[in-house]
Image (tube, rainbow, N blue to C red):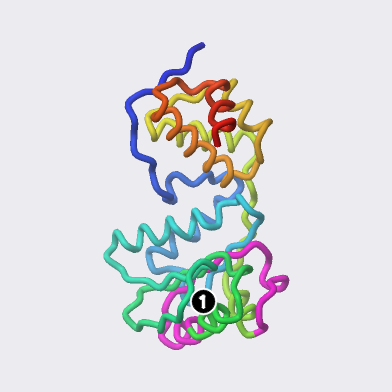
Amino acid sequence: MKQLVLDIGLPVGPTLANFGVGANVDVVAHLDSWLQGGAADVPTYLWGESGSGKSHLLQAVAHELHNQGARLGWLDASVHGERVFDQGWSAILLDDVHLYNAAQQHQAFNWLINAQTLRCPVLAAGQWAPVALPLRDDVRTRLGWGHVFALQPLDELGQRQVLRQSAVDRGLVLGDEVLDYMLTRFSRDLGHLMELLNGIDQYALQTQRAITIPLIKSMMDNA
């Protein structure tokens, strides 16, 4: 069956609603409560392998806080240069903490100390459990003394559902054969699959072609 490119929709940013929940129902419920001011007296730390959705959840929370008019502190491994803790922040979010260099660890420690003193909610994420993080002891222990959740990656059915829904949100149709090809020929890391979908969307729009396996092959040949 021929797949057609429908009306082009804008990509939807990360939200709790479009997170592929799978076995992580308790995590999403906790973050819903966290956003309402509950369960925020101690840090919340999310950990899991690449593609498990850590950054999606942090970005979703940041998006919701911005929608509420809140100001927040954000730190990930790509952010360089010292930023002083702002007492006007409603929360601090620390992503990919396992990649922090010495300066970023110093800044994270300063933020965590201020957050504890001022009762500012903290949400952080990394690839490993707190005890296994390659960080200085005072940062690692502070990340692990609150709520800690291990994210469970989606199974193949869950990945199919997320990819299909993301395509629908963009005004695209992904046939079963295209999904089969994506899941057998590329990394099963959901983050990589979403990047692949972004590329397919852009390439289909540029070439004015339907989304088929030959289109994907052409895109990869021209990458």
Task: Look at the picture and state if 185 lies above or below 121.
Answer: above
Report the residue that reaches farthest toward the top: 1
The picture quadrant where one finds residue 201 is: top left
Q: How many marks?
A: 1
| The magenta stretch spans residue 113 | yes
Q: Is residue 123 visible?
A: no
Task: Look at the picture and state if 21 lies above or below 117.
Answer: above
Q: Position of residue 83 (x, y in %)?
A: 42, 80
Residue at point 62%, 43% (across, down): 154
- Asked whether 71 or 39 is in front, the reply is 71
Q: Is residue 4 visible?
A: yes
Residue at point 57%, 67% (across, down): 45
Q: Position of residue 202 (x, y in %)?
A: 43, 35
- Asked whether 144 or 205 is in front, the reply is 205
Residue at disc 1, secondary structure: loop
Q: Magenta stretch: give its range.
A: 111-137
